[in-house]
Each structure stands twice: as structure tokens, then as C-alpha cells.
Image (cartoon, helix red, strand yellow):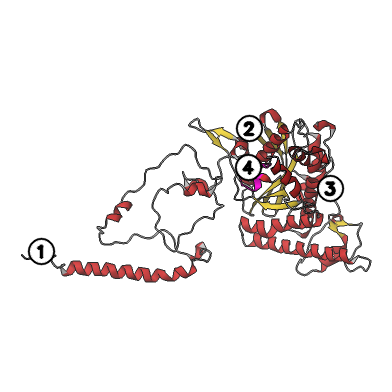
Amino acid sequence: MVKGTTPPLSPSIAAAKSSRVESWIQQLSASSPTHADALSPPATPENRSSLKRKPEPSPPCTYAMSARNTSPKRPRRDTEIEVLPAHSASAVGAASSSSALMLNETNTFSPPGSQTSIKSSRRANSPSRDNITVLASASPPTITEPSSGLKTPPPQRVRNVIEQLEDGLGRGWIPGQLRKSIEEDADFGYQRIESHAWDDRTTPCLSDKDIDSKELEALAYVLRKIKEIWLNARMCQARGRDENAWCMDVIQPLIKLAMRLEGDDKFWLQSVQSQAIATEFLSSVTDTSGKPRILDRKADFTLSFSHMPSPGFEDLYTRLRNVRNPVVSHMADAFTKTTALFSCVEVKPASGDHTEAEYQLSIWMAASLRKKMQLARRVGLIGKDNLVEPCFAIVGHDTHVYFAHVVLEDRDTVRILGPETGSLGLCETRSVSGIFRALRLWQNVIRYGRDEGSNGFWGSFMGIVLQKLAGDADEGYGAPPASAV
């Protein structure tokens, strides 16, 4: 019996198949060098080819897998909870994209901290449609507005804190000993510095023999750090650098310099860029379908009360854990939720949107104050007048200062006043004088936050609440004024 055999391919079909195989091998060979750069940053847009390719005629392919690309769009699966641009990237990764992505050397992926929406990529790439007006009508409300023009003045405690942060910003914010060094430094070039910016109480020259060696070393260190910050800020502005560069090269060194000058090691500068807020402290609005929609955004930095041994608060945090009261912040992160937080900073590049930064810090600070109010209720602290915290929206060179406080406790209403004008509005990093003024501002912020007396945030509110939660309120990290009990 003769077995059946496959008839030979015609010359034309065989040639076509051979041509396709050779073309496929050439494409693989051409793309192989890119594997060596897998650990390098993605190419900049001007150096890489467009993801859009011109259509080229190709012979018909009969492979079964090609059927996956015949459909122009996959059906969308609606979910009960919308993932907003402020939600974590991990939530986005769980959803399928609207079309298949062909992997090649030009594809790049967003970093873990980026925010995207599973419903529309356009929403992730454009400014949020929500703003502070939406927050004012949300539940619970967050009201963000300038203090100038208010029908009634802010509470006295808020005005007192504003004055504390203004200390030294109107006159004498630059040490007089540094005047000659600044004026003669060729790297600084010409600097327009007002005469009242110099501290007249200090000696006029850094080389003065009467200056103590430790003081001389400290002044030289400050000037060196100020110079680095100024040069970095100029580079960020001139080269159009992104938010991360402004954070790491300008804002973070400035705040850490203030922390070092103030000493005590009570604070950490903590990045919370990738950390979510516990949803119970977020506001929500009703969407067009009648469902509640959570308003959620993140901030860049916060000051946290250190977990290190004294002068940090390691012992207090241990006592809180022992009495099963470890959660003291509004964050969902396993560590940060056990850390007492103070203030927040949202940074944008020079081309960034101040309105969006203001919206982000409003959400973050309102949630922070609501958690603190919850803790205060648990320990029976009736008055919340001393719950006042500064917060900052920094866009490029300019620092915008705000103050968050409680308006209506029964509705968990938070009001955020700002941006403030006057000397607080003159803190910037485009000039040496502006950086010294910003440094003085941050020193005032840290001093207010850690002060154990009745004028400080720790002494008048945070320390009292945490000590009571730990079961030993009488150890004394300050005492509340009469209005707060």
C-alpha cells in the first residue's frame, strides 16, 4: 500500500515563504543590540523614533494568532470602583489595556509612583478636572482660600502661628558675616540684596578673628550649601528639569539644611510620593451615576517625628504599640501609619500647575487633620484650636505657604488658608537672598513643630494626644492652654 505524500510547494509559494523568513531574521538581528541597553534610561523623545509606523504592504498571514489583532477594540469591563489618576499604579496594572501592545525597543513604562487611569489615558496625562472648588462641596468639606479678604479674621491661634513663621523674614535673614564672601564670590555674580537683608547684629566679615572656630565652620558650611542649592535651582530652571529634580536637588537639600541648623534630630524629612491615604479620611462627591467618588491625591514630602532614640520618640512609639494604639497617621503605608506627621510639601517644576499643587496639598492636609481630630476625640481632648499646621506648594523657584486648621469639628470641615502674602510670599530660590529667606522660613517651621511649650505644635497638641494614647499623659510634653481643655 502506497502512503500519501504532501505535494511539493510551487516555486512561487516557496519563494514567498523564504522571503518572509529572511525578512523576519533580519528584523531580529537589527533589534538585538538594544538588549545591551536594557538597564539604561529610556531614550529621550528627540532621539527615538515615533511609535507610529507607516503602513507597509505585506503578504497575507494565515497564522491563527493574527486573529487577536483583527478586532479594532476590546470590550471594556466596567468596575464598581473607578481608579482615579491619584490611585496607585498597582491598581492600574490589574486592568487590561484597550488594545494589545507590541513590545519593542521603543516602549517605555511609567515608574511605580506614576498615576494613570484605567478608564482613559487622556485623563492621566492632563490636569485633573477636580479642583479646590470641588473639595469645598465635598463630604466632608475642605475649604481652601486666601486669608486676605475673609469676612471674619482667622482664629487667634492661626494668626499666632503665622507670626511665628514670619519671624526674621522681614529683616536680617542673611548673616552679616557672610556679606563679603557673597559679594566677592564669582560664581554668584551680581546679586541684588537689600540692605535690610543683612543681620546688623553680627560681625561684618567671615574672616574676622573674633569669630569662634566652630561658628566660622558652621557659617562656611551654610554658605557652601546655599551655593549648591542656588546653582541646582538655576540648572533646573534653565534646562527645564522635572519635578523629581526640583525635589531632590533643590527642595530636599534646603529643608535638610534647616533641620541640621535647628538640631535636636526630632524630625525626619520623609518622602510620601508613592504612599496612599487611608480612604476613611478622604472626601468624596457624588458622580453622574449617583455613586460616591473619592477625591484622592498624593504629596511629595512630610516632616515626621523620628522613631530614633532620644531626642527622637522611639520610647513613645514603643509604648503606643504596647497599648495597641500604634496607628497615629492618616497614611495606609505599614510604617508611616505608625508615625506622627507634621506639615506637607507638594513640589512642581517651574512649568508646573500651581492649581494642581494646591489641590493636592489640600486633600493631603485635610486627611491628616481629620486623623488627628479622631485621635483627640479618643483621648477626650475637647478643644482643637491648637491643631494648626503649615503646608507648602512649591512651584519651581516659588514657595507658596498655607495654614490648615479645623473649622467645624462636627462635620470634620478643614480650612486651608493661603497662599499667604507679605514676607511669607517672598521665599524663593532664584536668588541668594531668596534662598536665605526660605531657609529662615524652614527653620521657623521646624522650631514651631518641635516646640514642647504651649506655643509649639508638639507641646500644645501632638505631644498631649500621643502621651494620652500611650497611657501616660502626665509625663509632660507641654500642657494645653485653657482654651483647649
Q: For mark 1, what is the residue?
A: 4
- Secondary structure at numbered mark 2: loop
Q: For mark 3, what is the residue?
A: 167
Residue 188 point in image, percent of width and height: 76, 66
Residue beneath the point at 81% across and 49% down: 447
- Secondary structure at numbered mark 4: helix
Which badge, 1 or 4, comes first in the chain's sequence? 1
Q: For mark 4, what is the residue?
A: 359
Report how far apart the C-alphas of labels 2 and 1 lie in the structure: 80 Å
Residue 338 point in image, percent of width and height: 67, 45
Q: Are marks 2 and 4 in contact (CB under 8 Å)?
A: no
Q: For mark 2, what is the residue?
A: 140
Q: Is the magenta stretch mostly helix, strand or loop?
A: loop
Report how far apart the C-alphas of labels 3 and 2 lie in the structure: 34 Å
Which badge, 4 or 3, comes first in the chain's sequence? 3
Report how far apart the C-alphas of labels 4 and 3 lie in the structure: 28 Å
In this rendering, does residue 392 appear at all? no
Q: What residue type is labelled 1?
A: Gly
Which badge, 2 or 1, comes first in the chain's sequence? 1
- Secondary structure at numbered mark 1: loop
Q: Which amino acid does label 2 sit on?
A: Pro
Magenta residue check for 331: yes
Q: What residue type is labelled 4?
A: Tyr
How many other residues sit within 10 Å of disc 2, few (<14), some (14-19) or many (≥20)? many
**Residue at the limit of the structure toward the right, as seen here:** 210
How many other residues sit within 10 Å of disc 1, few (<14), some (14-19) or many (≥20)? few
Residue 4 point in image, percent of width and height: 10, 64
Residue 414 point in image, percent of width and height: 69, 35
Q: Which amino acid does label 3 sit on?
A: Asp
